[in-house]
Amino acid sequence: MNAAPSELAAYDELQCYTLAHGGEAFIHQHVVDAWIAQHADERTKPIALTFALVGLYLHLERGFSGRQVQRVPMALGKHKKGWPSFELPRERGSVTALQAVAEAPGPERDRTIDAWCASVWAAFRESHQAVAALLKQHGIG
C-alpha cells in the first residue's frame, strides 16, 4: 500500500476517533473499508479488497451500518473459498483521510468520512456489478 506519511498519520487519527465513537453505527468499519480500497495495490490480498468493496457497497448502496457491514465477511467466509480480482482504478477518489481528519470531530468529520467512502466507491464504478453479484450469489444485501 502506498500512502504518504501524513496520510498514514491521518488514518491513524481517524482510527482512534472512530473506535472511540461508539454506537451501533460503528463508522470505524467504513474508515477501514475506504482506506483499504483507496490504497490497494498488486500486493493487496484479494480477500481484503473484496471485503472493503463489499463494505462500501453495503454502506452506500444499501444503508448498512458499520456494525451490519462487519458481520457480512463472516457470512461470506463460510461459503467462499476463492476471491475475485478487482481491477484497480488509476484514480481512487478525490477525498482522502486527510480531508476527513481536517474536520473537527463530530458531525462534520462523520459527514466527510461518508464523502470519502462515496468518493472511493465511485472510483471503483467498474466493479459495482461484480460486487452486487457476489453478494446476491450468497443471498446478502
Image: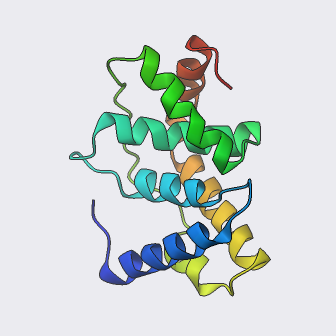
Q: How is the image coloured?
A: rainbow
Q: Look at 68% across and 26% down and name the residue there.
A: 141
- Where is residue 137 drawn, in percent x and y? 56, 12
Q: Is residue 83 above or below residue 35?
A: above
Give the residue furthest to the left.
Answer: 43
Q: In the image, is residue 66 above or below residue 116?
A: above
In which quadrant of the rendered view does residue 55 lie? top right
In this rendering, would 43 be left or right of 141?
Answer: left
Residue found 65% across the figure and 49% down from its top: 66
Q: Which is more toward the observer, 67 or 37?
A: 67
> So how many labels did they put on this image?
0
Q: Is residue 87 visible?
A: no
Left or right, residue 38 beside residue 141 = left
129 vs 32, nearest the viewer: 32
When the figure is inspected, residue 87 is found, relative to residue 2, above or below; the finding is above
Residue at 53% over, 24% down:
75
Q: Position of residue 34 (x, y in %)?
A: 51, 56
Quadrant placement of the N terminus: bottom left
Residue 63 pos. (x, y %): 76, 42
Residue at 45% x, 14% y is: 79
Along the line of sight, the residue nearer the viewer: 33 or 98: 33
Residue 53 shows in the view:
yes
